[in-house]
Each structure stands twice: as structure tokens, then as C-alpha cells.
Amino acid sequence: MATDTQANPRDRIAWLALAGLAGLVIIVLLVSWWRRPPQMGVDDKVFQTVDALYTAVRSENPSRVTQCEERLKGYFEKGLLPKPAFVFLMDVIARTKRGEWEPATKRLYDFMLAQRREGKKPEA
Amino acid sequence: MPKRNGFTLIELLVVIAIIAILIGLLLPAVQKIRESANRMKCSNNLKQLGLALHNYEGINGQFPPAYQTTDTRAVGSAFGVSYPDDNGNGLPGWGWGTLLLPHLEQDNLFRRFDMNAGCWAPQNADAVKTKVAAFLCPSATGGSDGFEVQKEGADVRHGVPITLSNGNRVVFAHSHYVTNAGVHQPWGRQPAYSFDFDIPEPIPENGNKLARIDGPFYRNSKTSVAAVTDGLSNTVFLGEHSSILSNKTWVGVVPGAVTPPRLDLRPWPSENNAAGCLVGVHSGPDTHDHPEVIIHAPNDPFGHTDEMWGEHGNGCNILMGDGSVRFASTFTKPLTWVALSTRDGGETNGN
């Protein structure tokens, strides 16, 4: 005689399917959160330079990219640009030096679109 | 006890979850069809505006200006609004859209305006709120029922409503279309060069190189067909600017106004622009941006309030001077966008 504590096999499969779907949703959310571009702070000069970098990358103009790279390095050294954002931007610039202009554009576009410009201005 | 063959609650939950996922997958396809219809309607609006512009030019020998100021040196105050502002803006401030109304089968509305008074004058308060479908893109979110015109607020990213001497606020109808001022932003010039936008300004940051406003529309512009020497089919006249980025209007310009980004809707990283940007945008690079060369094609990801912005994916519809409507992608090459923005830059464009 079956007792109340014994699970129905159909229920078990259904529970597994539900857990699988929930797991899938959680994984998708985690991956999208993990792949979120870093924030670059609130400094006006940094914003202008990243904007100029975007123009330089879309123009496929190596000398302008180098100018922006030098300025970004300076801002990083002064503490105006957080390290994760600096590393991200240097990766974009490295791609342009390898001639990968389109992937660099796409990556920089997503980075810029994700910026929020919220928080306190760092002391330079 | 007989065995029951129905579904258990858990099985039903699984089925519902699978259906929800399938709907989630199908929804973008349905929205794509809707968006395609909206984009066509938007394109038709721009074509209608293009016809109106050419009708106006046919009668007046020139296209309407982005907006009007009769005397940029006149000093005074009208209903609590002081003029001129730092940019030389003053009375009456009427914009390109108001001047086009008789050519858009909106004569009755046009007759309601007191064109001798400022566009912010109380006697115009009701008429300037009128929603005109030709100026509204169905895809644009962020509002189409009018907005309170603002002046600079707590910082360069916020504004506060302009209040008239009678205690009322200035509310203008929305426009999701803006005029093209060219490479430089007329609303961002040094005050000394803001009386007449046809006079070039020497830019110290750029080796004292002279810069002038080179687009087809700006304050008091008198652009004729002959003045567009780059060719009408190679010059952008109008483009989209959704109110999800910042509020724009067809009505006109109030001295001292600003165009704050819609931080209530999205955390845009951009800043306010000055009054003239209520009716116009530019392509960049701006005269004062050097050494940063910033060119913003439509939908530039930082969302400048003085760029074109459409909600049709990665770009927006633009009206060329010849009346044709094209889609401009955000990935348009910067120098191509600059070339399309000037009326007489002498550039050569591909297709």
C-alpha cells in the first residue's frame, strides 16, 4: 500500500523539469550579470576621452587611438579611472592595434551604453 | 480508491513555464512586425515634413530657420523671461515647426498663435501645447503629450521648470524630430560670437582656426536650395530625437532654457545643452571639444542631448534635403556623418 510520503514518479519528473528551467533562468541571469561591462566613474575628462576614443575607433584612426590611450593611462594613474574599466578599455585599444576594428567598436559601444555616471567624483 | 489520470499541479506549472518561455521567444518577432509598421509611419512623417519644407522654400525663397530671434542684441524681459541669454536668444523664439504649420494643413492652429509675442507668452500657452501627429514618431517612448521647458538646475545634468511672472510654467508640445545645425553647436559658442551665427568664430583650442555654423538650420538661418552646394541629396535636414533621451519641440526656443537628459527614464551619462538645442542637434566635432574629437552619429551610446536618437534599433530615420528619407545607423563612419551634416563642406560621399 502506497503512503503519502512516497512521491508520484510523474511528479518527480515534473519537479526535475521545473528545477531545470529555473536553473536555466538563473544561469542566464548570472552570465548576463557577469558579462556586464565595468563602470568608469564620473569624471568629465574621462568621459570626454572615452567618447573621443569611440570616434577614433569608428574612424579607424590609429594616431587618435594612441592619443586617447595616453590620456586614459594618465587618468588611471591619477585615480580618476577605476582599474576594471581601465583594463577593459586597454583591451579595446589592444584589439584596434591588432586591426580588429569592428569587434573593438562593438565592445566599446556596449561599454559606453552600460555607463551610468553615478556616484561621487574622485579626488584627483 | 480509483487512480486519477489528471495532471498534477507540478505538471501544470511546468507546462505554464514552458509556454511562458515560448511566448518570451516569440515576443521579439511580434514586436519586430509592430516596429516595422512604426518605422514606416515615422518615415512618412519625415516625408510630409520634407514636402512642407519645400513648400515653405517655394513661397519664401529660403527654408525656415531652426528658430527666430528678431534682435539678438535687444535686452529686456517678457513675462518673467529675461533676454538675451548667453547665446543671444530673445523674442519671439518661434521654431521651424511653427513656421511649417500652414504647410502641414494646420492653418487653424497657426492662426491661434500671436506671432508678435514670445512663444512662451501666456496668450500662446494653450496653442503651444497642441499635439501634432506629424511631429511624433510612434516608436518614441518618453512622452508625446508635451513637457515643461526647463532652465539649468542643481548641476549640468538637471533642470528646473521655467516659471513665468504669472506663476505658470512653460509647457510646449513634443517633437520627435529635430533640425540639423551641422558640425558645430551654435548653442555652445562664446557669447561674443553668438549674436550672428553666420560670423565665423576663431577657436583658440584649434589653432585659432575659424569655425562657422555650416548646417542647413540654425537661429535666423536663411538657407536656400542654392546655398546647399553639397547637394540636397547629400545633406541631412531633419532627424529623429526621441523624448526618452531629452525633450524637444517644434514650437520654439525660450531664452535661458536647457535640455536635460531624461534621467527619470534612463541613467544617461550625458549633460544639458543650451536653449537652441530644444529644436536642433549637431554632428560634432564641436569647436570647443578639441583636443577631443567627438563625432556623434545617431544613437551614439553616451546619448548626448544634442545628437539624433531614434528608437528603431541602432539608428534613426533622417530626412535629406531632397525630401528622401533614409535610415542612419549608429555605426555610420564619423567622417561620413560629418560630410552629410554640412550644407557646403565640399565633401564627397559614397552611398
Image (cartoon, rainbow, N blue to C red):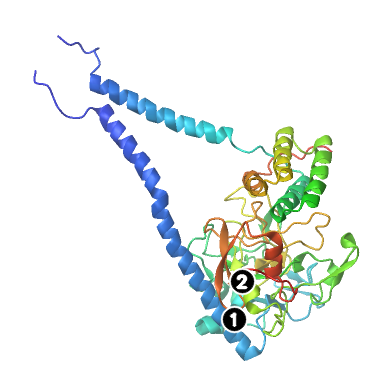
Q: Residue furthest top?
A: A1
Task: Check whether the beta carbons of the residues at disc 1 and disc 2 lie within 8 A of each other.
Answer: yes
Q: Amino acid at mark 2?
A: Leu
Of mark 1 and mark 2, the one earlier in the sequence is 1
Residue B142, compared with residue B104, is above or below; it is above
Pointer 2: what residue?
B238
Q: Chain of mark 1?
A: B
Residue B99, compared with residue A46, is above or below; it is below
Residue B218, compared with residue A17, is above or below; it is below
Between residues A23 and B351, which one lies in front from this camera angle?
B351
Q: Residue furthest front?
A: A99
> Which quadrant is the N terminus of chain B positioned in?
top left
Disc 1, SS: helix
Q: Picture coordinates of residue B204 (x, y %)?
A: 90, 62
> Which quadrant is the C terminus of chain B positioned in?
bottom right
Disc 2, SS: strand
